[in-house]
């Protein structure tokens, strides 16, 4: 079991996708193209990441 806080950083190809990713709870915009997700629960962190990917992928296609 992971017992420390982890952060995932995601860089998008355009600012609109980064902004859309912030619709997901816990996603914080770092700069124009980058967001990060920080959580101490690895399952919740993974779920947020998958949600961001699915949400932005649907928009990008």
Image (cartoon, helix red, strand yellow):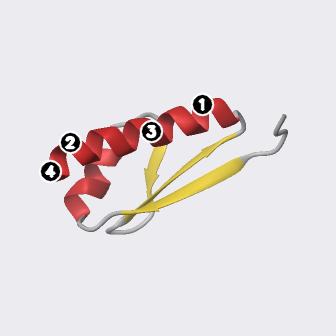
First in residue order: circle 2 vs circle 3:
3
Q: What residue is shown at x 48% (from left), y 42% (from top)?
A: 49
Q: CA distance from mark 3 to mark 1?
A: 10 Å
Mark 4 Cα shell of 10 Å, populated few (<14), some (14-19), many (≥20): few
Residue 44 marker: 1
Mark 1 Cα shell of 10 Å, populated few (<14), some (14-19), many (≥20): few
The nearer-to-camera label among 1 and 2 is: 2
Mark 2 Cα shell of 10 Å, populated few (<14), some (14-19), many (≥20): few
The part of the image, by quadrant, that contains residue 22 is top left
First in residue order: circle 3 vs circle 1:
1
- Give yes or no for contact between labels 2 and 3 (Cβ–Cβ under 8 Å): no
First in residue order: circle 1 vs circle 2:
1
Is residue 33 depicted above or below 2 in this figure?
A: below
Q: Which residue is mark 4?
A: 61
Left or right of 57? Residue 59 is: left
The part of the image, by quadrant, that contains residue 1 is top right
Q: CA distance from mark 1 to mark 4?
A: 26 Å
Left or right of 42? Residue 12 is: left
Q: CA distance from mark 1 to mark 2?
A: 21 Å
- Give yes or no for contact between labels 4 and 2 (Cβ–Cβ under 8 Å): yes
- Give yes or no for contact between labels 3 and 1 (Cβ–Cβ under 8 Å): no
Q: In x, y percent, where is residue 21?
A: 34, 46
Q: What residue is shown at x 52% (from left), y 32% (from top)?
A: 47
Frontmost residue, 23 versus 44: 44
Q: What residue is shown at x 45% (from left), y 63% (from top)?
A: 30
Left or right of 52? Residue 40 is: right
First in residue order: circle 1 vs circle 4:
1
Q: In x, y percent, where is residue 40?
A: 72, 38
Residue 50 marker: 3
- Give yes or no for contact between labels 4 and 3 (Cβ–Cβ under 8 Å): no
Residue 58 marker: 2
Left or right of 1? Residue 27 is: left
């Amino acid at each position: 079991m992971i017992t420390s806080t982890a952060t995932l950083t995601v860089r998008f190809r355009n600012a609109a996708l980064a902004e859309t990713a912030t619709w997901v709870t816990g996603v914080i915009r770092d700069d124009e193209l980058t967001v990060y997700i920080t959580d101490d629960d690895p399952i919740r962190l993974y779920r947020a990441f998958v949600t961001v990917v699915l949400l932005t992928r649907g928009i990008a296609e």
